[in-house]
Image (tube, grey):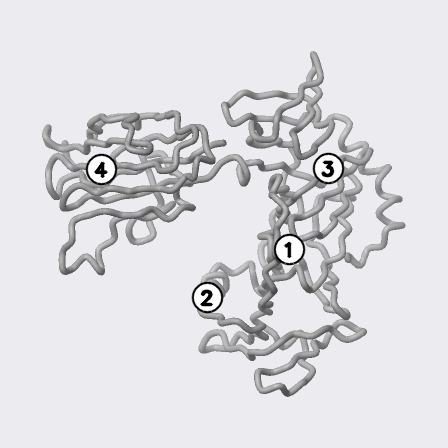
Amino acid sequence: MYYANRLCLSLLVGGVACLTTARADDLTTTLGKKYSGKLVAVDPSGVTFQTADAKVQVPAKEVQVVDLGNKIVAPGVGVKFVEIELVDGSVVRSSKFAVKGKAFELESLTGPDKLAPPVFTLPMTTVFTVLRGAEDPKNREEWRGMLAARGKRDLYVIRQNGGLDFIRGTALSGNDTGDMLNFEREDGTKTELRLSRATGGLVFNQLVPASVPPTLCKVHDVFGNIWVVQAIEIMGPGMRLTTVSGVTVEYPALAGISKLDYGEGNITYLSDLEPQITAPKFPEDDIRTLVLGDRALCREGLKLDNVPITRGVWANAQYDELILTYTLNGDYKDFKASVGIPIPATAKVAPKEAGIKLTVEVDGRPLFSEVIRPNDKPKPLTLDVNGAKQLRFTIEPLARFQYTQIILAEARVQK
């Protein structure tokens, strides 16, 4: 729970409420339709939205995003912060934290002037990781590498000149002042570890629950927090969230909310899925990259027609036909993307025979089959994949070793 008490928050509600009176919300559906007005209510079935003409109810499966128009406040230059990831994927930013008993206490990062932060209690059982120095990209990269080989115990992580080191065991509880962690080492020895000396952070090996509530959407707030929620309730000028992990979060004013992102439940990007890859076999294939998500070789960003692309699939059919098969399990209705061949900055005019024949199938039924040329504009695709179990892309180069790369920009399936 934040150190600011509820009395202070309630006194601020009246002052903050005035910030929302001129607020104009925008709702975008998965089909690209837009509404402008005011968010009225949210429940598992959908969103109620008041426009200038009428009250509109949009089913949850058709909502892509509800933008409340409140900007996220980025941490200032040189501001250090802790990033706490919950077991449900929620991410909470904090200037500092304490562990008292079986709960975390956090201090929020600074938001807009006079805007009170959200109020919540964070049980230790809902926390997956605590990363110190989250403002540094190098720390994040090192942290991801450590997590990949973390094992099955809790970790008390220390950042040293040579990298991250850690003590394995079980985190039991915090002390009354919140600055010490009761910890049982792997050999059964119990000790107290000072939280300030966990300069890397903490990792908790939480039990997997027998059942997990369905995700409704992700809520982004102006303080930089991202909540993966199962329920939302609008309460007067404010909002109450219940995360998938069971944490209740209260905002005294909607000015604290930036957007409700339904893409988590309704849209899945192919770059988040693992395809089955069918390609020619060569002795050196163990070191040859054929498919990448959200980037090209050498960690370069994706780009088509000189336009940067945030999400997408990069594929290279350098030797012969390359087939990518994605499992959909009948959960989606539409596939959308823009496809094109990336052109190197130093490239000259492409030869006439260069190009890639792209075929898209669902469950063995062809939906699209055309030749994509290097100098063509990116081609938009919207294909019906309703009820399909598998989505397959056959990428066939027309000239070996020439323009064999293709990008499926913003490739996604929608419910």
Image disc number at residue 102? none
Earlier sequence position, callout 4 versus callout 3: 3
| Residue under the image location 56 percent in, 71 percent down | 200
**Percent x, y of residue 249:** 74, 48
- In this rendering, position of residue 387 left or right of residue 135: left
Q: Label 3, label 2: how many angstroms apart (C-alpha)?
A: 35 Å
Earlier sequence position, callout 3 versus callout 2: 2
Q: Label 4, label 3: how many angstroms apart (C-alpha)?
A: 47 Å
On the image, numbered disc 3 is attached to which residue? Answer: 255
Q: Label 4, label 1: how many angstroms apart (C-alpha)?
A: 42 Å
Q: Amino acid at mark 3?
A: Ala
**Percent x, y of residue 268:** 46, 39
Marks 4, 3: nearer the viewer = 4
On the image, numbered disc 1 is attached to which residue? Answer: 93
Q: For the residue labelled by badge 3, is the local secondary structure a helix, a strand or a loop? A: helix
- In this rendering, position of residue 175 left or right of residue 415: right
**Percent x, y of residue 403:** 17, 38
Image disc number at residue 395? 4
Q: Are marks 3 and 2 in contact (CB under 8 Å)?
A: no
Earlier sequence position, callout 2 versus callout 4: 2
- In this rendering, position of residue 353 left or right of residue 205: left
